[in-house]
């Protein structure tokens, strides 16, 4: 049976195991360090590479618990956000257990990694993904090209997501952002990005007042000034895009609002 005919999941786990075994130091995959061990494979947080005081765990099911929450106990809706908690080492017995653990930590990443390396990973661009949306998300079809570009920079750069976007606005319009150098490819906009795109579409619908600000920009500025005076940002979870303190919302404001605020006043 040729490599192209074999089940993709089996081919992916075998290719990944060979890739890991070829490096004495192990391989970086997202925030993981994966390396061969005498009794199978060992995974740990990359930042814990040299530590000896880690909590020992075993079996793929432990990976599901590791991936579920951040260091502070918050839910992680996007598993490729760079907030994987530290302090553990995970042992798995064989290739199957390694693949299962990776799928808990970074869902679908192993197959996408393999298909990209084989030149067979299909890519779905934003306009096609947006065209499939319905209900409250149908409005993302109307997001401008500039809005898609800004949303991608705010949502998908390495500071907030470890995947490397392969998709563009459409087949002829690539994203204008640094794609990163990580091993995990992103072949299409994820559901969290579509939720963020909905918020940006709502922003684009707003009109500006005499000062050049929209109503939501005014509310965000007021909330941030109050928070700065109190000494802390208003709390917002990763997917709470309607809140002023959401990190991706703040990144979008930094891209689109801050340059306007810094423009010199007209005489």
Image: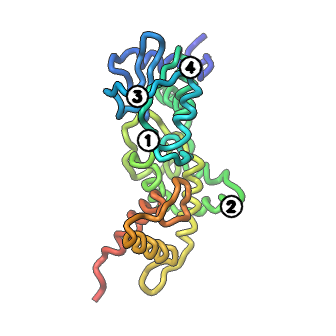
Give whichever of discs 3 and 4 has the lower sequence position: 3
Q: CA distance from mark 4 to mark 1?
A: 23 Å
Crowding at dot 4, Cα within 10 Å, few <14 / some 14-19 / many 20+, comes out as some
Q: Is residue 103 visible?
A: yes
32 lies left or right of 120: left
Q: State the scheme by which the image is colored.
A: rainbow
Secondary structure of the residue carrying tag 3 is: loop
Please tell me the numbered disc located at residue 54: 3
User: Residue at the location (49% across, 80% down)?
Assistant: 208
Give the structural element (helix, strand or loop) at label 4. helix
Q: Quadrant of residue 154?
A: bottom left
Residue at the right extreme, as displayed: 135
Tell me the residue that label 1 is attached to.
Answer: 162
Residue at numbered disc 4: 97
Q: On the rendered image, what quadrant is the C terminus found in? A: bottom left
Tell me which residue sits at (58%, 18%) in the image.
10
């Amino acid at each position: 049976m040729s490599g192209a005919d074999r089940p993709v999941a089996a081919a992916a786990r075998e290719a990944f195991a060979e890739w890991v075994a070829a490096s004495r130091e192990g391989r970086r995959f997202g925030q993981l360090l994966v390396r061969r061990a005498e009794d199978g494979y060992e995974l740990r947080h990359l930042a814990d590479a040299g530590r000896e005081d880690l909590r020992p765990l075993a079996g793929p099911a432990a990976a599901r618990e590791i991936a579920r929450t951040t260091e502070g106990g918050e839910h992680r809706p996007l598993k490729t956000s760079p907030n994987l908690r530290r302090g553990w080492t995970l042992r798995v017995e064989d290739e199957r257990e390694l693949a299962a653990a990776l799928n808990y930590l970074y869902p679908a990443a192993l197959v996408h990694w393999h298909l990209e390396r084989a030149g067979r990973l299909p890519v779905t661009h934003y306009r096609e993904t947006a065209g499939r949306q319905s209900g409250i998300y149908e409005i993302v079809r109307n997001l401008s090209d500039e809005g898609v570009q800004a949303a991608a920079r705010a949502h998908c750069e390495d500071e907030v997501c470890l995947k490397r976007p392969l998709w563009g606005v459409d087949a002829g319009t690539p994203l204008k952002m640094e794609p990163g150098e990580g091993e995990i490819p992103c072949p299409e906009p994820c559901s969290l990005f579509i939720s963020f795109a909905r918020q940006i579409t709502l922003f684009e619908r707003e009109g500006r007042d005499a000062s050049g600000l929209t109503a939501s920009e005014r509310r965000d500025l007021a909330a941030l000034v109050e928070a700065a005076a109190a000494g802390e940002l208003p709390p917002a979870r990763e997917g709470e895009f309607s809140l002023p303190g959401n990190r991706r919302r703040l990144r979008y404001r930094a891209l689109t609002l801050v340059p306007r605020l810094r423009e010199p006043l007209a005489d």
